[in-house]
Amino acid sequence: MPPARKRTRTYDPAKIRVAVLAQFGNVRQGVHTLTEEQLARPARLGEWTVRELAAHLTMAVETVSRNLDRPEPGAKELALLDWPFATAARAGDIADGTRELARDNPDLDALYARVEQRITERLATAPDDRLLAARTGAMTLADYLVTRAVELVVHTDDLNRAAGADIPLDRQALAACTRLLADALAVKAPGASTEVRIPPYAVVQCVEGPRHTRGTPPNVVETDPLTWIRLATGRTEWKTALDEAKVSASGERADLGGLLPLMG
């Protein structure tokens, strides 16, 4: 279990709702333009094809509607910052469910339209503090929607790279994804000796050692949001990012290679 966190960042629930719907809309439009040749390409995620990845993206949103249709659990079980560390255990079930979903829904346009209509209708009346019986643990709707922003951003990037697409990333969704994964690093490696900068969205301090108080920190890591997300989710290795000058790292405690990825 990760160490106790020092603080919890807050997210504007109204903005997150808009961001999730906007990013899903971006993906729906992008998937509509993919050719059969693109859909048949490997997704670079295990044995998935791009078609299966596209189907999986609907699962990230449909779980909101499905959980809102279920009885509300009695108590919250999972805090938002615990979520990144609770996802790996479900990888096998997710892979099986994705293949089945893609097989049963060859018409991706119809699948996306159905999922978008359901979540739009259900979010219209669901309060932010409504508890959802998510498989990783019961969470509030407000927190769970932040995790949906993460899923959508991560897999939109996967889709773009695998299919050669150019699906845009909603700025608010990208910001939430970057910040949650940055805060997860600070939970995994508590401390204040190293400053990790991911402009324009996040700055966190982490890693045990002498605490920095003034001036330029002795240990600094800086990268862009997409590179950070790829590092945090295991899409890119730390050494590769350094070699390609996607990350700058200075100081004896600036090597994050042993702490990444944060979620698989």
Image (cartoon, rainbow, N blue to C red):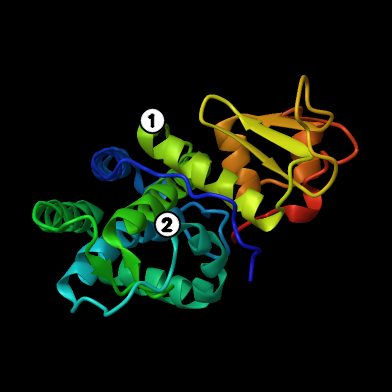
Residue 68, image x and y in percent?
Answer: 19, 68
Q: Residue furthest front?
A: 213
| Quadrant of the image containing the N terminus | bottom right
Q: Nearer the viewer, residue 86 or 91?
A: 86
Query: Which type of secondary structure does the marked residue at label 2 adopt?
Result: helix
Nearer to us: label 1 or label 2:
1
Residue bearing mark 1: 171
Q: Amino acid at mark 1?
A: Arg
Q: Amino acid at mark 2?
A: Leu
Residue bearing mark 2: 53
Residue 70, image x and y in percent?
Answer: 19, 77
Crowd class of label 1 (few under 14; some 14 to 19; many from 20; radius 10 Å): some
Taking the spot 38% from the left edge, 30% from the top edge, the residue there is 171
Q: Residue furthest right?
A: 252
Q: Residue furthest top?
A: 215
Say if 8 sits above or below 97 in the image: above
Query: Which type of secondary structure does the marked residue at label 1 adopt?
Result: helix
| Quadrant of the image containing the C terminus | bottom right
Taking the spot 28% from the left edge, 45% from the top edge, the residue there is 13
Res. 257 mark: none
Residue 260, image x and y in percent?
Answer: 71, 53
Q: Nearer the viewer, residue 236 or 247?
A: 247
Taking the spot 49% from the left edge, 50% from the top edge, the residue there is 8
